[in-house]
Structure formats: C-alpha cells, structure tokens
Image: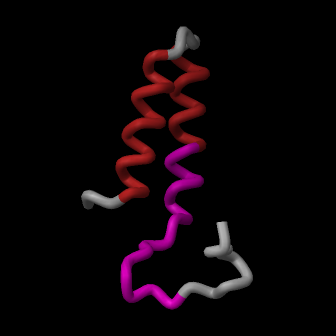
Amino acid sequence: GDTIENKFLDVLFDQINDLNLAEDIRGQLITNIYIFSSRFLPVNIDTNIHRRYFNYNV
C-alpha cells in the first residue's frame, strides 16, 4: 500500500542499495529490516493512539 511506512522503507532500501557494501551484508541488512518492518502496525486517522507512546507536544 501507499503508506508513510512503506514510503519510508522504499527510501531506506534505496539508500542501502546505494551503499558500497558487500552483497551478502547488504542482503542481511535488508532481511533484518523486512523482519523489523513486519512488526509495523497500520496507523490512520481512526487509530486509537495510546498517549504513553506518542507525544503531540513537540
């Protein structure tokens, strides 16, 4: 989907691919990010946000 989270991942993967890393290291980094991003929860205008984890007074 076209979400902020997916856009963030696209930019992150583009940056990783631009790095001068060995292919196996780059592959492991991308795999780790996929595992990490699988824990993302979708957030939209109707999401009930727990204030303990979000600070709107920035």
Q: Is residue 38 magenta?
A: yes
Q: Residue 44 vs residue 30: left or right?
A: left
For the residue pair 51 and 27, the one nearer the viewer reads as 51
Which quadrant would residue 9 be assigned to in this image? top left
Q: Which residues are magenta?
A: 33-48
- The extreme front residue here reads 57
Q: How is the image coloured?
A: secondary structure
Front-most of residues 45 and 21:
45
Judged by its main secondary structure, the magenta piece is loop
Residue at position x 45%, y 86% in the image: 47
Residue located at (59% from left, 54% from top) = 36
Residue 46 sits above or below residue 36 on the image: below
Image check: 6 left or right of 21? left
Where does residue 15 sit, x and y in percent of width and height?
47, 26
Question: Residue at (53%, 40%) from the top-left corner?
Answer: 31
Residue 51 in the image, given as x and y percentages of width and height: 67, 85
Closer-to-camera residue (39/47): 47
Q: Is residue 58 above or below residue 24?
A: below
Residue furthest to the right: 52
